[in-house]
Every structure is written in C-alpha cells, then in structure tokens.
Image: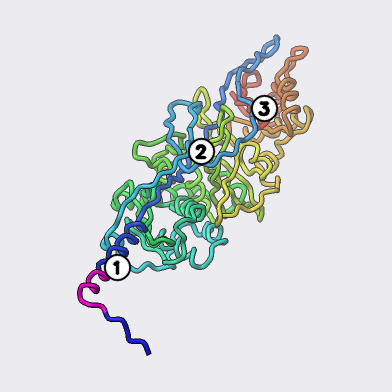
Amino acid sequence: MPKPMRLNKKAYIEFAVSVCVITFMVVALCLFPEADNSKGLPTQTSVAASETISHTDADITTAVSSIEKSKSVKHIKSTTTSKSAETGSRDTKATSTSTESKTVTSYDKSDLGQSEVSVNRFKPIDNFKKHMMGNMTSDQKIILNQILNGIENFETVINIKKNVLKRDDFETIKSLFVLVKIACIENSSVASTYRYVGNDDYISAFKLTYTKSKKQAMSEKRQLMKKTDSILKGITADMNEFEKIKYIHDTVTKNCVYGELKSGSHDSAYGCLVKGKANCEGYSKAFLLLCNKAGIDSMIVTGTAQGNDGESDSHMWNMVKLEGKWYHIDLTWDDPTLTPVDKSYIRYDFFNLTDSEILQTHTSEKNRFYVYPKANSYKGNYFVYNNYCAVDFDSAYDAMERAVTDAVLNGNKYASIKLNNSKTYSSVKKKLFKSKNGKTPVFRILKSVKEKTKASISEKKISKIFMEQTNVITIGLK
C-alpha cells in the first residue's frame, strides 16, 4: 500500500499561496457589469393643419392640409435611444442609435446586501401580471419578483436567485429588463441602465440607480393615485367597455401634451397625468394604469413606429381587450398637434386596430417572455363601432352626416369618417368638398343636420383635416 504524500512546511506555504492567487483571479474575472438602455422614445405622428373655408357661390377653397404619405415600415432593433426634445409641433423626430458598452468594476461583500426578498410581492398592474409572467419558468418568475421588490424598496443592489440567469444569455437579460421597465408603472424613479455581477456562468445580483429620492418618488406616487382617482370618477355605471376605453383615451389625450420634462418624468404615468407632458412611454403607462383601475384588461407593446420621414424609431403603445377581443390602441399618435392649437380635436385613427392595420406603421419587438395576443377583430374599431366607415361616395356622405349629427348632439366640434382604402379616400375627398351648380355636398350635410337637430352651427363655414396616412377625413364645425 503506497504511503500518503507529505508536504514539508515550505512546500505547504507555496501551495497555499498558489491557491489564493488562482482564487483571486477567478473572482476578479467574474465580477463585471453589463450596461443596457431599453427606454423607448415616442415616434411622432404627422402634424395636421386646419384651414377654415367658407361656402360661396363660387367653388370652395381647396384645403391646404398636407399630411405625408405612409411609407413601408422599417424593422429596427435598438438597444439604446437618444432623447429628442420637441417644441411646438411633432415635426421633430426622435432618433435611435444602437450602442453596447461594458464597464469593468468590482464589488465587495458589503455592496451586495444580505436581505431576504419575498417572491410574492409582485406590485405592478394586476391584469398585466399574467401577460408578463405567462411564459416564464418558476425560477424566472422569482427573479422578476425579486427585482421588482427591490425597486419598490429602492435597493441599489438586488440579489437574485442563483444559478438561474446565465451571464452570457443577453437576449433573456434584455427581455427581462424590458418587463422590469414597463412594470414600473407607479414608480418612475428607476434609471434605464443596469449592471450585474456573478461568477463565470451565472448572474447573482443586479445593481440599479435611481433618478429620484425615495421621498420624492413616494410623493409623486401619491399625487398620481389622487389624479387617477379623480379621472376615474368620470366613469359611470351605465358605461359599457367601449365607452370606458374611449373616456380614458379622450381624457389622456386632452390633458397631456407630447414632449419632455426637465425632471425626466415624461416617460411615466406621473408625467402624463399629473404634469401633463409625456412621451410615448408616459402615454402608454398612463393608459394601462387607468384601464387597470377601471377593470379593463390592457398591456403595453414595445417596438418601433414610422416617423414623418419614413424612418422608424423606438416606440410604445397599448393593446386593450374589449368584449373578449384584443385591439391595438396608440394614444400618442391620436394626440396630434393641430395648427392652430385646439385641444378639442382628438383623433381616433389608432383607436382599436387589428394586427394588419397597426403593421402599416408599427412593428412590435419580440420578447422571450412577453407574447402579444392576436388582434383580428374590427368590431371595436372607433369608426366601425360608430358606423363612420365608407366604401364609396354615397356611403361616405351618409357616414359624414351621422358623424356630424353625433358630434352636434354630444357637444363635439369635430366629426370624422374613415374610407376603406386610399383610392376611395382620394375620390371622396375631392367630391365631398367640390361645388357643383352652386351646391357643395359637405354644406348640404351641415344644412340637413342643422334642420334635424336645431343646432347652432354654421351651414356655410367649416375647417377640414385630411389624414392620408390613415384615410380619415375630419371636418371642424363652426
């Protein structure tokens, strides 16, 4: 039987030193952060110019409202976005650039914290929970809960369950933090960058930064809750789901202006509802928050959308469930800047669209965990629901008369109809406003409505807005 090997004192010391050096090198190599910015900026929609026109014996003045034609959507994947401030109109286009950076850093044990995290404190939107977590494993759900719980407690370093999230699985990490970003509906203080730490194979903790103090964030949350409660008082018991969604859509677009805030809150429901200024992220989070509190199932969609110049930028919008069917709805694009400014003008061009309709201008971003439901019903579309759609001039004439009548009876200033395609749109636009033998179809409509409703509207003066991108014709009553 061989004798066991024995080390003399010198050899033992050399062996111990070698082990320490190797261990130190392994630890140093494993501790590194990863930076990412998944904050989406809104894409601007076309600016509508409104021109007042009067009815005379001569032909009606040709409208000068000019809207850029829709171009095919370009699919762009962006990991970071640059902010673009906007003043006055939405002609300024936000740009997006792809960047990737790594910064070497190290932490000592005290950085990581030792507090236990409950996995049952998922705090974002209730209806949103099942959409976010439906395709996650039980361990991945635990990690998402741990991160959101840490954010709720303003932890700068958040431990996660070990040996689950692989360090080199960048697609999973990115998908996870997209969920984190859109889940922070009531807390807008989390910065859009993060770093992580772990061993050779797995991540064990994330390090986050906050743009606001906990005291300030809690104050903003209280203001936000007070504002949402005030808004939701406008929802009455006799409203159906469509009317509730329309009320939320109209309230948000009437009370918020597209743009950026110096405080950085424009990407939050707080910025949209309390400060009255937001980008697409703020609009979509505000809509989601109000829908949840009103008992309406909704979710946020991340992706890109086509700007005025045909280029695509990072964007957020919503999907909403109405009578068991899902639809796309984009409040940012339904809140245009009208020249001259008139906040009573609300668009419904992007109110409850199908997948095929939204794909004309928008492209959703794939996420490993977050699967969007199919949207293939037209029933809940604003124009279909109200019977304001047309396929030729005769049906357009009738649809406009219905739209004007409803506008007058409901105290609205604008009436809109939607044509089935660009060819019909061009034809109707020409015929509806063309004078022949001293008679103009649109003014015949106004006269008929005035006689039926006894409304005090002008029969001889209107403003008109043409939206070629969506085949929508709008008239403003005088």
Task: Decide whether residue 315 is among the magenta residues.
Answer: no
Q: Residue furthest bottom?
A: 1
Q: Give residue 320's position: percent from left, percent from top.
A: 59, 50
The residue singled out by tag 1 in the image is: 19
State how many labels appear: 3
Residue 293 visible in the shown view: no
Q: Mark 3 or mark 1: which comes first in sequence?
A: 1
Quadrant holding the C terminus:
top right
**283 vs 393: above or below:** below
Mark 3 packing: few (<14 Cα in 10 Å), some, or many (20+)? some
- Asked if the residue at tag 1 contacts the one at tag 3, i.e. Cβ–Cβ closer than 8 Å, the answer is no
- Asked if the residue at tag 1 contacts the one at tag 2, i.e. Cβ–Cβ closer than 8 Å, the answer is no
Dot label at residue 253: 2
Residue at 70%, 9% (x, y): give it.
58
User: Which amino acid type is marked by label 3?
Assistant: Lys
Q: Which residues are magenta?
A: 7-16
Asked whether 132 or 275 is in front, the reply is: 132
Between the C-alphas of marks 3 and 1, the distance is 93 Å
Q: Secondary structure at mark 1?
A: helix
Q: Give residue 411's position: percent from left, percent from top.
A: 58, 34
The residue singled out by tag 3 in the image is: 450
Q: Main secondary structure of the magenta part?
A: helix
